[in-house]
Image (cartoon, helix red, strand yellow):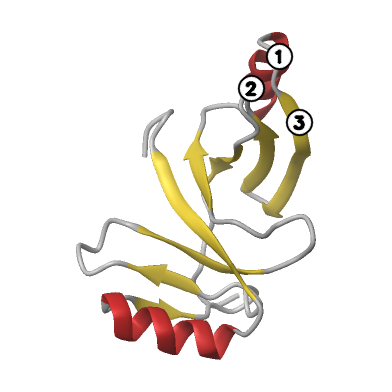
């Protein structure tokens, strides 16, 4: 994906199996768990393009969050803060070749950032 593309949507859930059954039945989503990401089942829409994760719900994560691909999380967060946004979660590793972060925009919306490539094959 290119800089600025929405890569996925995370949906906060308390019970992965219940959410898998629900979203699979409602939308026909294919939901799989990958080695190393057992607490983060990934969903794929029937178009085989749209997708995301069923992320653990927490006090800080209660609403779905879109995640945007960027060339550089550090540069993007610098721009966000220069324009008045707030960093909620700084750049953190997912794997050795991928990172994520979260910021809050001027209207209070939380947007995820993704940089790199995440290998979901067997580890």
Q: Are marks 3 and 1 in contact (CB under 8 Å)?
A: no
Q: Secondary structure at mark 1?
A: loop
Give the residue number, with chain letter if any, for mark 2. Answer: 106
Residue 113, picture quadrant? top right
Instruction: Pick whichever, 26 or 1, lies toward us.
Output: 26
Q: Position of residue 64 (x, y in %)?
A: 54, 56
In the picture, which quadrant includes the N terminus?
A: top left
Q: Are marks 2 and 1 in contact (CB under 8 Å)?
A: yes
User: Could you tell me how far apart the alpha carbons at marks 2 and 1 are, in whole angstroms?
Assistant: 7 Å
Counting residues from the start of the chain, the first of labels 3 and 2 encountered is 3
The nearer-to-camera label among 3 and 1 is 1
Give the residue number, with chain letter if any, for mark 3. Answer: 87
Q: How many residues crowd mark 3 within 10 Å: few (<14), some (14–19), many (20+)? A: some
The answer to whether residue 55 is above or below residue 85 is below
Q: Secondary structure at mark 2?
A: loop
Q: Position of residue 38 (x, y in %)?
A: 63, 80
Q: Position of residue 94 (x, y in %)?
A: 67, 55
In the picture, which quadrant includes the C terminus?
A: bottom right
């Amino acid at each position: 994906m290119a800089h600025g593309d929405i890569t996925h949507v995370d949906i906060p859930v308390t019970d992965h199996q219940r959410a898998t059954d629900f979203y699979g039945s409602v939308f026909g989503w294919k939901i799989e768990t990958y080695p190393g990401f057992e607490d983060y089942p990934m969903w794929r829409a029937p178009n085989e393009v749209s997708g995301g994760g069923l992320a653990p719900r927490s006090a800080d994560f209660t609403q779905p969050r879109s995640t945007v691909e960027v060339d550089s999380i550090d540069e993007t967060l610098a721009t966000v803060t220069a324009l008045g946004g707030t960093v909620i979660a700084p750049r953190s590793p997912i794997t050795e070749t991928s990172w994520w972060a979260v910021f809050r925009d001027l209207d209070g919306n939380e947007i995820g950032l993704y940089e790199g490539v995440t290998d979901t094959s067997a580890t």
